[in-house]
Structures are given as C-alpha cells and as structure tokens.
C-alpha cells in the first residue's frame, strides 16, 4: 500500500474528485504542513496554524501509480493560483504535495514538467517532506462531505464541476 498526501483548495473537492479512482483504498481529509498539533477546522481557517487542507490517500501502487495519482490531482485544481482556489482564499487552500523519499520527488518533478505545459502561468505548488509534517485527520463532518451533502450550494457550484472535469479527463481510471 502506498500513500499520497496532497492539498489543492478545499479538501472536499480533492477527496470527491479522487476517492473513487481504481486502486484508491482510502481517502481521509485533514491538515498538514503547519505547526499546530491536532488543529481544528476553525483554527486552520483562521490562517494561524500554517496548515493546508489536504487529503491523505492510501492506494494500491500495483493498480495506480504515483505519477497517475499526481496527474489526477493536478487536474482537480489550478496549481498556478497562490494561496487560493477560485473564491476560496487563504494559505490553507495552497497547492501542496508531500513526498516520501527521492523516488516520489523524482516522480513529482516529472509530472510537474508535464503539468507546466497545461498552463500559461507558473506553477506555485509547494513540495514538502511527508515525514517532516504529521497528517492530522479532519473532523468527521468533513469526510465524504460531497457525497453526504449534495444539497449544499458549494457542492453544486464548486465541487461538482471539479469532479466532472476529473472524471471526463480520466474516465478510464474510474470504476464504471
């Protein structure tokens, strides 16, 4: 089993866009990259913890590889927007990837080279060492938020278009 921890805007979007990929075994929204232990959603949104909203994915690397996971992630958000995704503004919404070792770093750098050709603006994705930044699981209300809250206007206007974009671009990677 392999692990990928990434952030790119609201964690509801990233979780919903990627959790049903073939090979993904678990998806947990949470917080990482900051200095406060056991942060709460309110603290992270208060912009004083240093944490980003992230999702920790556990996946079977025999089914889906690290590079493919990253390409889907970069489809699900705009890595050229500094500390924001659309109207969600703040450092907690930054584009960030946590890597575990040189092999993952090399995989990420190769993917970033490809992703850079998708955009006119420079990429602003942060790269951090996974082992230097604990992952803190978000409160239960944030898990499967999109699936459990289809009536929420944010889900309809923000999350759903990202999910649809990812599924359209990477249809073969999802269970039918």
Image: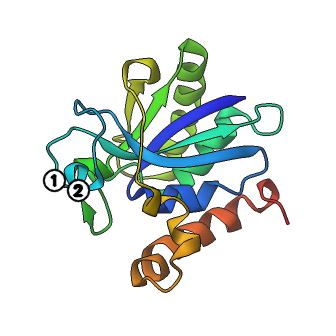
- Which residue: 36% across, 50% down? 80
The answer to whether residue 139 is left or right of residue 26 is left
Could you tell me if the residues under marks 1 and 2 are in contact, i.e. CB atoms within 8 Å?
yes
Q: Look at the image and tell me in which quarter the N terminus lies.
A: top right
- Which residue: 45% across, 24% down? 130
Q: Quadrant of residue 49?
A: top left
Tag 1 residue: 46
As measured in the structure, the alpha-carbon distance from the residue carrying label 1 to the one carrying label 2 is 6 Å
How packed mark 1 is, by other alpha carbons closer than 10 Å (few <14, some 14-19, many 20 or more), is few
Q: Nearer the viewer, residue 101 or 169?
A: 101
Give percent across and percent down for residue 68. 68, 41
Q: Look at the image and tell me in which quarter the C terminus lies.
A: bottom right
Give percent across and percent down for residue 56. 53, 41
Give percent across and percent down for residue 76. 53, 57
Residue 2 is at least partly visible in this image: yes
**Which label belongs to residue 42?**
2
Secondary-structure class at tag 1: loop
The answer to whether residue 62 is left or right of residue 114 is right
Secondary-structure class at tag 2: helix
- Which residue: 32% across, 33% down? 33
**Which label belongs to residue 10?**
none
The answer to whether residue 176 is left or right of residue 126 is right
Q: Quick one: which residue is furthest to the top in this view?
A: 102
Q: Nearer the viewer, residue 90 or 110?
A: 90
The answer to whether residue 88 is left or right of residue 30 is left
């Amino acid at each position: 089993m392999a692990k990928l921890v990434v952030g790119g805007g609201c964690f509801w979007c990233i979780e919903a866009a990627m959790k049903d990929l073939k090979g993904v075994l678990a998806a947990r929204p949470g917080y990482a990259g900051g200095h406060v232990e056991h942060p709460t959603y309110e603290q992270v949104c208060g912009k004083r913890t240093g944490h980003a909203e992230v999702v920790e994915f556990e996946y079977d690397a025999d089914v889906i590889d690290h590079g493919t996971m990253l390409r889907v992630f970069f489809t699900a958000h705009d890595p050229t927007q500094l500390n924001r995704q659309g109207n969600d503004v703040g450092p907690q919404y930054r584009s960030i990837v946590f890597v575990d070792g040189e092999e993952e770093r090399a995989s990420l750098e190769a993917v970033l080279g490809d992703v850079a050709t998708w955009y006119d603006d420079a990429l602003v994705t942060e790269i951090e060492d996974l082992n230097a930044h604990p992952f803190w699981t978000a409160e239960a209300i944030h898990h499967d938020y999109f699936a459990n809250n289809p009536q929420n206007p944010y889900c309809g206007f923000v999350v759903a278009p990202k999910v649809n974009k990812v599924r359209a671009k990477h249809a073969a990677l999802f269970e039918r």
